[in-house]
Image (cartoon, rainbow, N blue to C red):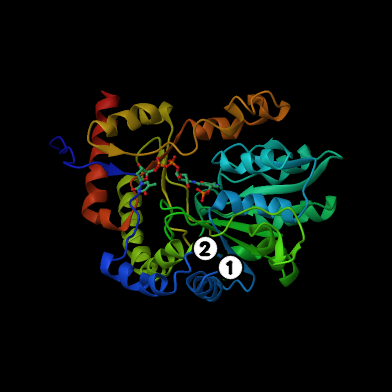
């Protein structure tokens, strides 16, 4: 094989869908006329309604980011003491607990799903534990049944960080239907996005009212401030973006599916390379294309592959390395010890998220795969 060509433009881990600028301007015309830019505007309400339908989520509220949505779920459920969570996640997950004065307790992950291991959760429970904060990493659902059983045995709440899931389903059940609350991120890097934004899907009407109250300073009406809320509102410019992006999600799904198929075909059977297998009865979240590199078999480390790709103008990302438990704020916790998190530690040294977005196309994915294969063969020499 001849040496693959360097891309003449940076190929990043993702590239957000954007609507035609004229469509965005047209969507904003009404906003310009009535000048309601934020605070429960018409576009926000419309987006909440459409997402509720689309995600089969009768109780959904939108927020200015996924992180603040998670903070509000923690506040609404009144979590205190300790909450068990994985270290193999984006820092926003444990940070949301820290901001609430709750201590994160790290538990290891399952080597296949890469999500929190229910047995490890059970071992980490103490009299101070009030909840489990699971993360559907890369959109792979946690073992929701096993976690529900642990929570029921110990009377714990369950919150899911579903930042990487949009319309994922488990046996036809929407991902937001598990636990007490599920957060979704609508950041620009996500399949469905509002530039910035997030959502909470909650169990019932009472909790929906509470999270909506908390996102608007706790103000019930002009005379009444019921609880110490915060400003967590999504504005009309973001909601307009969301409405237009929503119309394009189906096409993006299809395009990403072709990219996934290409990567799977090209990496199948290569020693030391693995893409997490699709779980039966779970729909693909189309959020990341994850490669696990075992250097003892591949002949090249994840870091060498990551660096090598850069020389071809390809910017993959080692999500999530380092582990949250390695950050200065958390590394002193007893649960942060490497011996407590062997799978998380190993996986965080193996993962690389490859460029993954519809515009990359099959031809782009083939070129990325050519470069990976080339770097591996050079590494083995
Ligand atoms: N929980 C989990 C498990 C999460 O993964 C996240 C966020 C959260 C909670 C918190 O949700 P939010 O509060 O963000 O709603 C990015 C995102 O900023 C972050 O949302 C995401 N997870 C995380 C996995 O990825 P960075 O620091 O890697 O972003 P950045 O700016 O380096 O962007 C990555 C690549 O994407 C760039 O190479 C270029 C491309 N890009 C990025 C942006 C922002 C674009 O092409 N356009 C853009 O607008 O964190």
In the rendered structure, the answer to whether residue 268 lies left or right of residue 157 reads: left
Residue 174 has which mark?
A: 1
Q: Which is more N-terminal, label 2 or label 1?
A: 2
**Residue 206 as seen in the image, left or right of residue 217:** right
Q: Nearer the viewer, residue 320 or 23?
A: 23
Q: Residue farthest to the left?
A: 2
Question: Quick one: label 1, few (<14), some, or many (20+) residues within 10 Å?
Answer: some
Q: Quadrant of residue 286?
A: bottom left
Q: Which residue is at the front of the view, 17 or 132?
A: 17
**Residue 3 pos. (x, y %):** 15, 35
Beta carbon at label 2 within 8 Å of ligand 1: no
State the mark number for residue 199: none
Q: Eyeballing the image, is 159 above or below 51?
A: above
Quadrant containing the C terminus is top left
The residue furthest front is: 223
Q: Residue at coordinates 42% horizontally, 58% vertically from top-left?
A: 191
* Residue 285 shown left or right of residue 128 in the figure: left
Please name the residue shown 44% across and 61% down the image: 238
Helix, strand or loop at label 1? It is strand
User: What x and y, as percent, mark residue 29?
Assistant: 35, 73
Report which residue position mark 2 lands on.
Answer: 168
Residue 380 percent across, percent down from the top left? 29, 25
Q: Is residue 351 left or right of residue 218?
A: left
The CA span between labels 1 and 2 is: 6 Å
Give the quadrant of the N terminus: top left
| Rendered residue at 49%/50% (across/down) | 138
Could you say which is closer to the camera, residue 95 or residue 333? 95
Circles 1 and 2 in contact, beta carbons < 8 Å: yes
Helix or strand or loop: what does disc 2 sit on? loop
Viewer-closest of 186 and 210: 210
């Amino acid at each position: 094989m001849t040496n693959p060509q360097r891309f003449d433009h940076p190929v990043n881990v993702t590239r957000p869908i954007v609507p035609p600028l004229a469509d965005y301007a047209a969507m904003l015309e009404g906003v310009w006329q009535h000048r309601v830019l934020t605070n429960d505007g018409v576009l926000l309400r419309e987006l909440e309604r459409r997402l509720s339908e689309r995600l089969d989520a009768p109780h959904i509220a939108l927020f200015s980011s996924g992180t603040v949505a998670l903070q509000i779920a923690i506040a609404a459920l009144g979590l205190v003491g300790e909450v068990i969570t994985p270290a193999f996640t984006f820092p926003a997950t444990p940070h949301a607990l820290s901001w609430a004065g709750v201590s994160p307790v790290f538990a290891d992950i399952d080597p296949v799903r890469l999500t929190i291991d229910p047995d490890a959760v059970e071992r980490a429970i103490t009299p101070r534990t009030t909840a489990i904060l699971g993360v559907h990493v890369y959109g792979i659902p946690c073992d929701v049944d096993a976690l529900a059983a642990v929570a029921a045995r110990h009377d714990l709440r369950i919150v899911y960080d579903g930042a990487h899931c949009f319309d994922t389903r488990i046996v036809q059940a929407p991902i937001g239907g598990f636990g007490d609350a599920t957060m979704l991120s609508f950041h620009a890097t996500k399949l469905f996005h509002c530039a910035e934004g997030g959502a909470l899907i909650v169990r019932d009407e009472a909790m929906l009212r509470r999270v909506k109250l908390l996102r608007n300073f706790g103000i019930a009406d002009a005379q009444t401030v019921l609880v110490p809320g915060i400003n967590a509102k999504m504005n009309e410019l973001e909601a307009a973006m969301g409405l237009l992006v929503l119309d394009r999600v189906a096409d993006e799904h299809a395009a990403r599916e072709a990219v996934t198929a290409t990567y799977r075909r090209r990496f199948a059977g290569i020693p030391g390379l693995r893409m997490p297998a699709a779980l039966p009865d779970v729909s693909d979240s189309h959020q990341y294309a994850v490669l696990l590199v075992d250097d003892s078999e591949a002949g090249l480390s994840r870091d060498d592959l990551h660096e090598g790709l850069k020389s071809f103008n390809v910017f993959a990302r080692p999500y999530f390395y380092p582990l949250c438990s390695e950050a200065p704020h958390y590394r002193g916790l007893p649960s942060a010890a490497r011996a407590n998190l062997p799978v998380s530690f190993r996986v965080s040294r193996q993962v690389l998220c490859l460029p993954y977005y519809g515009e990359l196309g099959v031809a782009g994915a083939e070129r990325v795969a050519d470069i990976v294969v080339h770097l591996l063969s050079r590494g083995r020499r």
